[in-house]
């Protein structure tokens, strides 16, 4: 095999990896906040759909992607508020409410999309966030393609992960979040408002999940379709566990998922590969499973009160 | 605690309002009132959303034509994709006196065959099917042969391009046959022309479709063909962004990549179905076999070039293609020949 | 906050709580009209049995519970406390019995938790760490602010708790049963330290049920019983006997009527047992001992020195290594719970809520926790509810457990009655070897008496009993021999002679037997 | 048993039973508001929905047919959830069952009916059970979180099914992605012709009742519940916690697999790529809705079946997109949650 084709192959995979990881990463980092505070939200899939639809419809109507993103985030926050009300105030089982959110997200976005854009005569595509061109950097061979030709929301993850890490580990707010998921009563006795902390963490989680959904319509595909999230919310849940409840952990594990996904798509495009494509499609999921099993020797525990309502 | 309940309800209502107010409803209100008893009724079982800009939308548009041209009372249902649901949906239509029911996909065959004997006055049509069985004469397979236009596309791609990528949703006949046609067409020009198939495993993941397209482009291909319902949008988007060529499937998709879509394969299912429906309505429809639509049915399946493309298909090539039409229609070229 | 104290007078008074009422769901009345008055700079003991309402009263003051009635005056002003933040801001600190420390955070992070506005950047904890170091040095507390709480011993964690309260600037410090987790010497040290703090002007409320501590440390003492204030007296003007009477409401006869018995043959023997804790560190090291018929062997030690691991390993609930274990003449090669049970072992675990009971289950369901699969409770895999109910009712009667209906959830029972259920269940199996860990922790005096009498009765009936307890009084009252445990090892064996308490204390602190004697 | 305790029990039962039904009006009400806003006539929509679900005997049997896989899956999940195993993988287990049942139904098609039917069902159940036990094994052996592993195993099962029906098991090479029909000897009896109501539904009811008995009346159920509530206490009581986790996943996966087998043997008669439209995920809600009581699953399964069944007629006759039904299902769950809190609090007040 020539060197050049294999370098190009690698370049193609790596460039795609980050893009594919981005929506999962937004949702996963959000879920890190939520779970660190002790609330597990398996309704990410639904929230991502709500974020995607709100962002799309507003961006489409107004013509402004940024306004779309903003409304998407607001929709995410609102979803989080409701989720928090049920799981924190009412103290309902978090898995139950999460399951309900997945159904609601699918139902409400599908219904509204039909009602608003059923068989539309006008084109429904958006002009998505363009790929950025950096002087000099973008033209570096290999690295230019892999690192310096993405759109703004992909680069957003570079900001997101350090900021999330900083907030969680270097601010009083983050300290409180970590305490609240681990030993809420202890936090309570030193004056931390446990319920408020959990509300805020859940809403950060759903807001970021909504950004992940919005990314799909504003910066990847150019329009909403029903079920566009296609299981990424569930993958994000896996990524959180696999990333040991840390933003950087989520970063690396969503990249890992992304690389396997990109790899399987590219292997499918290669001639003379006789592996049934379904096995290639299963590859990212299988890899996640195997790595999860293999890496789990040094066990990192989930936040101690994950899933347990306080008082 | 009653206060709590109130708060919950209020919250949910507010959410609904907020989300719902985001846009104006575009749907027409449901039709009120009954049509005259003898009204001709046509129903559709769609395996997916009818606004997918692809497979399901062709059927929906055909239904709309029956409404405008035949005054038919129409209705459709997006059935849950489970065999358990199909029979019920057929029966629900048939019970209400629908004479023309289209199951838009081969997967409806078993259900139609099971239901049909109970409703001898109703015709059950099946898309993407070659079904015909004299013992259930009111179930008729309708096959619109996508492999023929796609053969042409493959031919054009091989003449003009360096390689082609085909992106499908799932491996079902309407998809895989179109790809077979494309590959045969391309190989007719150049047996070594690089062309590969990718399946996504779903119909919704637009992002994955786009990514699959990009991976073809990275691999050197400059022609794309997407056949994946909703997810197909990702393919057009990749054409637009990466400026590679491609073709539109089932309808006019030029707008999605105005300079890149070289030609559209239009499946005017309505043109094919309205005639059948008119016969059914008149009571003159006497099936003698399954029904095939191909390039020979010029009003049903045809190709429209995009004159505004960056590099429109050159005239010489169009002439060659015109010659291919004849060979395909005569059967000299088998577009569905097994791919080597 | 503006209205000043209505009733006068003594400018020395820093805190007054009047007619505090607090009840809990299920109708438990924890405080029913409690009065408390604390003077500036004093050490004020709050004395009462478990369940008398001491902790609840202080939790009300600390803003953890909202009282249904009553008022609080603090520093000459009406004090409306809604949450712990109010308390901390008003310079009230509390060291809880179950430490309120987040184990995954460092000492410094625990100390500053909740003290800053959320947006405060904690990029550099150096100044805080320095300050904590300084304070720790000033007070002689010896705490490293950078270590993780989960790596600290119980005693160290307590010091972190005290440091936390002082760091928050407490004028009034509440300590809830602080000596329960300390050796006698450590307790001594703590009491001295508290005295120093009081001398510097700090006011201390000290919750305890130990009479000696009250006598030793306090200026005044308020006695609570059944959620009511019985009296407040000056320590100098009272004596332990009087305090005990007020605390229990009757003359206390802590006489177990324990007679000397001649031990019989050896029932249980273990050689060189070693256990690793959850983090893989050695918790029990080369532990060897024998227990004979008609004998109680007590294991004394400060909590966290491997007692839990010892008990779990012996009960087959934790992996262990050993040379040999002999139970009832059978040599055991693997500590398997089912096998041990078959051979006649019973186990009263240390934490009834975590291990001994399944709280959402009913009383009768808990009675069959180990025998659910045996006839007559289960036939062909089906539970025989009628049999189970009859059996449960008979046990309830026999052990005078206070419960309305055996189908009631056990979570609704008081701690003492819950413990009685565990004890009844285990003893009813007529064990040859009984492993008992902390049998009377957190239960009232009546239940304590009852449980201890049952243990003695069991011994007199011929059982071999291993008693693990951090309560020295209990060890001395029940044991025929005492083994002292420190850092997973046996430091020595002593007889339960009251004169030996000091030596036991030294052994518990890790001194060798030679230096202790 | 005295009168008071009977009354108490009745009260308790009615409380737990009526909440899902009391929640329906709330969910439908919110749906109605949404319909109004979007320009539909909610009364017409709901009338169509009602018609679709209950207009005649056939419609009602269709509801039961739709409820069948949900009851299988929900009843199984109730066991797993009682054991505190968060099995999100019923979808994959359903596929596993459908695949195995189809294979047996085709390749052993010559066997006589009285042998083949049980064999098909057994194959489905055991295949689903094995797929479920895989997640339990990973949890026990490696501490892998079952929420994650079961999600991954769903995808893998679905892809394997896709490969089988487009490859090794395809009916005609190069044609439709479906297997051949299973042998007629494997078909379940449709006992109420002309409706399609089949013995699989009865089997689902029996399974739900059996699982109810196991959970609440047997020593096995006692251990499963104990492990779910307090694994430490369960270990103390001599229960092998890992084995119960394995068992709970086996029951849960087995029930889902049996559901898949019944779907093939009673309805589809062959395997498709998408044999389940998400039953595994609906099943989660079906079980949680009734507080993981296998008996209650019968009710909630029928409720969801009716909603689904009605939704298609709603789209057919009132032109309302059927996706709305997902929203209504979600709202039913949330309303039940809210009602649960309400009845819990009112109970406390009583005492």
Image: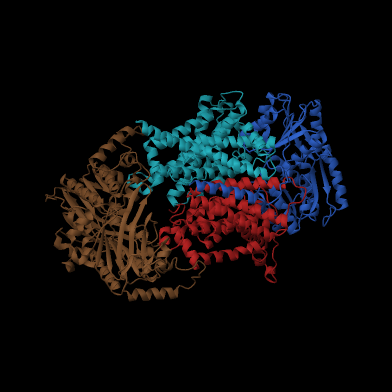
Chain colours: A red, B blue, C brown, D cyan
The quadrant where residue C365 appears: top left
Vertical position of residue C496 compared to residue B129: above or below: below
Vertical position of residue A55 compared to residue D241: above or below: below
Instruction: Report the side of B41 relative to C162 (left or right).
Output: right
Q: Name the residue nearer the viewer: B208 or C74.
A: C74
Residue C487: tell me if it is visible.
no
Residue in view at x 36 percent, y 54 percent? C22
What is the total number of numbered labels drawn onto the structure image? 0
Q: Residue D25 location, x and y as percent?
A: 57, 39
Q: Name the residue nearer the viewer: D331 or C326.
A: D331
Instruction: Report the side of B46 relative to C274 (left or right).
Output: right
Instruction: Report the side of C306 relative to A297 (left or right).
Output: left
Q: Name the residue nearer the viewer: D283 or D113.
A: D283
Residue in view at x 57 percent, y 55 percent? A206
Q: Residue B276 location, x and y as percent?
A: 80, 31
Residue in view at x 64 percent, y 65 percent? A147
Residue C338: tell me if it is visible.
yes
Q: Residue C490 location, x and y as percent?
A: 23, 60
Q: Residue B221 location, x and y as percent?
A: 73, 55
Instruction: Report the side of D76 relative to C472 (left or right).
Output: right
């Amino acid at each position: 095999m020539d060197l050049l084709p294999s370098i190009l192959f690698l370049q193609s995979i790596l460039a795609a990896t980050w893009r594919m990881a981005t929506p999962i990463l937004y949702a996963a980092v959000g879920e890190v906040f939520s779970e660190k505070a002790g609330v597990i939200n398996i309704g990410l899939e639904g929230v991502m759909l709500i974020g995607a639809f709100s962002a799309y419809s507003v961006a489409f109507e107004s013509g402004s992607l940024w306004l779309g993103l903003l409304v998407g985030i607001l929709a995410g926050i609102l979803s989080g508020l409701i989720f928090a009300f049920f799981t924190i105030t009412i103290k309902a089982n978090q898995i139950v409410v999460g399951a309900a959110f997945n159904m609601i997200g699918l139902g409400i976005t599908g219904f509204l999309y039909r009602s608003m854009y059923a068989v539309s005569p006008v084109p429904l595509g958006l002009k998505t966030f363009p790929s950025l061109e950096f002087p000099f950097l973008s033209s570096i061979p290999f690295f230019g393609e892999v690192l310096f030709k993405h759109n703004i929301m992909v680069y957003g993850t570079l900001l997101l992960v350090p900021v999330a890490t900083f907030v969680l580990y270097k601010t009083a707010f983050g300290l409180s979040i970590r305490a609240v998921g681990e030993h809420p009563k202890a936090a309570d006795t030193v004056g931390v408002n446990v319920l408020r902390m959990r509300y805020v963490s859940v809403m950060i989680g759903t807001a970021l999940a909504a950004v992940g959904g919005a990314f799909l319509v504003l910066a990847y595909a150019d329009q909403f379709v029903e079920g566009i999230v296609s299981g990424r919310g569930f993958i994000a849940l896996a990524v959180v566990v696999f990333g040991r409840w840390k933003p950087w952990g989520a970063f690396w594990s969503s990249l890992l998922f992304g690389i396997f996904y990109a790899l399987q798509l590219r292997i499918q495009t290669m001639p003379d590969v006789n592996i049934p494509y379904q096995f290639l499609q299963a590859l990212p999921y299988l890899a996640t499973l195997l790595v999860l099993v293999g890496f789990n020797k040094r066990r990192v525990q989930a936040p101690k009160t994950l899933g347990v309502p306080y008082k | 605690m009653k206060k709590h309940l109130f708060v919950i309800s209020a919250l949910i209502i507010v959410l609904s309002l907020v989300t719902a107010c985001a846009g104006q409803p575009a749907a027409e209100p449901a039709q009120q009132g009954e049509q005259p008893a003898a009204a001709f009724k046509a129903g559709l079982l769609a395996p997916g959303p009818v606004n997918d800009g692809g497979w399901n939308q062709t059927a929906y548009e055909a239904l709309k034509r029956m409404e405008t041209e035949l005054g038919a009372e129409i209705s459709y249902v997006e059935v849950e994709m489970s065999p358990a649901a199909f029979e019920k949906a057929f029966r629900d239509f048939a019970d209400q006196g629908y004479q023309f029911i289209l199951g838009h996909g081969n997967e409806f065959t078993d259900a139609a065959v099971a239901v049909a004997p109970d409703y001898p006055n109703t015709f059950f049509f099946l898309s993407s099917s070659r079904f015909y069985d004299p013992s259930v004469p009111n179930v008729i397979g309708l096959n619109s042969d996508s492999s023929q236009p796609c053969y042409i596309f493959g031919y054009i791609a091989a003449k003009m391009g360096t390689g082609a990528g085909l992106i499908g949703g799932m491996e079902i006949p309407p998809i895989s046959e179109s790809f077979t046609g494309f590959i045969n067409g391309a190989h007719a020009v150049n047996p070594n022309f690089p062309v590969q198939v990718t399946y996504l495993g779903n119909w919704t993941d637009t992002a994955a479709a786009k990514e699959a397209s990009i991976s073809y482009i990275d691999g050197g291909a400059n022609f794309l063909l997407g056949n994946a319902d909703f997810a197909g949008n990702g393919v057009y988007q990749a054409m637009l962004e990466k400026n590679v060529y491609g073709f539109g499937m089932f309808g006019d998709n030029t707008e999605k990549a105005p300079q890149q879509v070289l030609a559209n394969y239009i499946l005017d299912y309505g043109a094919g179905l309205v005639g059948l429906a008119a016969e059914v309505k008149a009571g003159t429809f006497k099936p003698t076999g399954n029904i095939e639509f191909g390039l020979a049915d010029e009003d049903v399946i045809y190709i429209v070039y995009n004159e505004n493309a960056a590099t429109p298909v050159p005239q010489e090539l169009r002439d060659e293609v015109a010659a291919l039409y004849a060979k395909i229609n005569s059967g000299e070229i088998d577009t569905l020949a097994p791919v080597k | 906050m503006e209205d000043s104290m209505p009733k006068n007078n003594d400018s020395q008074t820093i805190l007054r709580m009047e007619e505090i009422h607090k009840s809990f769901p299920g109708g438990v009345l924890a405080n029913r009209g409690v009065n408390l008055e604390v003077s500036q700079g004093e050490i004020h003991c709050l004395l009462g049995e478990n369940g008398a309402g001491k902790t609840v009263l202080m939790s009300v003051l600390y803003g953890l519970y909202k009282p249904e009635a009553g008022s609080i005056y603090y520093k000459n002003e009406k004090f409306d406390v809604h949450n712990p933040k109010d308390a901390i801001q008003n310079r009230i600190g509390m060291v809880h019995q179950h430490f309120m420390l987040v184990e995954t955070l460092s000492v410094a992070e625990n100390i500053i938790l909740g003290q800053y506005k959320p947006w405060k950047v904690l990029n550099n904890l150096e100044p805080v760490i320095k300050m904590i170091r300084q304070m720790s040095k000033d007070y002689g507390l010896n705490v490293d602010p950078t270590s993780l709480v989960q790596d600290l011993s119980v005693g160290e964690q307590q010091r972190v708790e005290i440091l936390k309260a002082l760091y928050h600037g407490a004028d009034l410090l509440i300590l809830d049963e602080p000596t329960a987790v300390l050796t006698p010497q450590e307790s001594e040290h703590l009491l001295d330290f508290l005295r120093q703090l009081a001398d510097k002007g700090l006011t201390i409320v000290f919750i305890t049920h130990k009479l000696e501590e009250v006598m030793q440390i306090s200026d005044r003492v308020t006695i609570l019983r059944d959620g009511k204030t019985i009296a407040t007296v000056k320590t100098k003007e009272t004596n332990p006997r009087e305090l005990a009477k007020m605390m229990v409401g009757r003359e206390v006869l802590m006489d177990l009527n324990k007679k000397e018995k001649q031990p019989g043959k050896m029932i249980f023997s273990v050689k060189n047992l070693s256990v690793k804790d959850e983090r893989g560190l050695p918790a029990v090291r080369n532990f060897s001992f024998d227990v004979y018929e008609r004998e109680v062997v007590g294991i004394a030690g400060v909590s966290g020195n491997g007692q839990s691991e010892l008990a779990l390993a012996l009960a087959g609930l934790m992996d262990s290594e050993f040379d040999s274990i002999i139970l009832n003449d059978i040599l055991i090669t693997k500590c398997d719970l089912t096998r041990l049970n078959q051979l006649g072992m019973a186990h009263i675990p240390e934490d009834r809520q975590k291990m001994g009971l399944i709280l959402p289950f009913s009383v009768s369901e808990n009675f069959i926790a180990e025998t659910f699969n045996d006839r007559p409770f289960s036939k062909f895999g089906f539970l025989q509810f009628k049999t189970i109910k009859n059996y449960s009712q008979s046990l309830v009667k026999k052990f005078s457990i206070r419960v309305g209906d055996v189908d009631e959830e056990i979570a609704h029972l008081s701690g003492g009655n819950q413990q009685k259920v565990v004890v009844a269940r285990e003893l009813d199996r007529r064990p040859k070897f009984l492993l008992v860990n902390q049998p009377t922790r957190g239960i009232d005096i009546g239940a304590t008496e009852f449980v201890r009498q049952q243990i003695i009765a069991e011994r007199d009936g011929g059982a071999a009993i291993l008693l693990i307890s951090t309560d020295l009084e209990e060890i001395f009252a029940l044991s025929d021999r005492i083994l002292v445990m420190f850092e997973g090892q046996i430091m020595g064996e002593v007889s339960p002679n009251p004169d030996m308490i000091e030596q036991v204390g030294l052994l518990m602190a890790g001194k060798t037997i030679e230096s202790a004697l | 048993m005295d009168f008071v305790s009977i009354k108490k029990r009745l009260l308790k039962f009615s409380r737990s039973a009526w909440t899902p039904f009391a929640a329906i009006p709330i969910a439908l009400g919110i749906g109605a508001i949404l319909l109004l806003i979007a320009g539909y006539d909610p009364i017409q929509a709901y009338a169509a929905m009602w018609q679709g679900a209950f207009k005649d005997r056939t419609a009602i049997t269709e509801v039961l047919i739709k409820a069948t896989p949900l009851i299988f899956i929900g009843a199984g999940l109730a066991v797993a959830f009682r054991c505190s195993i968060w099995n999100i993988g019923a979808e994959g287990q359903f596929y596993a069952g459908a695949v195995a049942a189809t294979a047996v139904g085709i390749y052993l098609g010559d066997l006589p009916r009285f042998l083949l039917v049980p064999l098909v069902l057994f194959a489905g159940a055991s295949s689903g059970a094995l797929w479920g036990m895989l997640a339990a094994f990973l949890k026990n052996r490696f501490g892998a979180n079952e929420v994650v592993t079961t999600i991954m195993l769903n995808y893998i099962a679905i892809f394997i099914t896709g490969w089988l029906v487009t490859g090794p098991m395809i009916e005609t090479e190069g044609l439709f992605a479906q297997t051949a029909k299973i042998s007629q000897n494997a078909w379940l009896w449709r006992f109420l012709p002309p409706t399609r109501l089949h013995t699989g539904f009865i089997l689902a009811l029996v399974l739900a009742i059996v699982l109810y008995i196991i959970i609440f009346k047997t020593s096995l159920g006692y251990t499963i519940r104990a492990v779910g509530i307090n694994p430490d206490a369960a270990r103390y009581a001599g229960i092998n916690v890992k084995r119960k986790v394995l068992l709970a996943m086996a029951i849960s996966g087995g029930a889902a697999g049996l559901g898949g087998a019944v779907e093939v043997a009673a309805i589809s008669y062959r395997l498709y790529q998408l044999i389940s439209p998400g039953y595994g995920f609906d099943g989660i809600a079906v079980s949680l809705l009734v507080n993981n009581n296998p008996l209650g699953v019968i009710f909630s399964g029928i409720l969801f079946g009716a909603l689904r069944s009605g939704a298609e007629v709603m789209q057919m006759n009132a032109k309302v997109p059927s996706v709305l039904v997902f929203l209504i299902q979600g709202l039913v769950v949330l309303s039940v949650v809210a009602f649960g809190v309400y009845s819990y609090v009112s109970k406390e007040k009583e005492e």
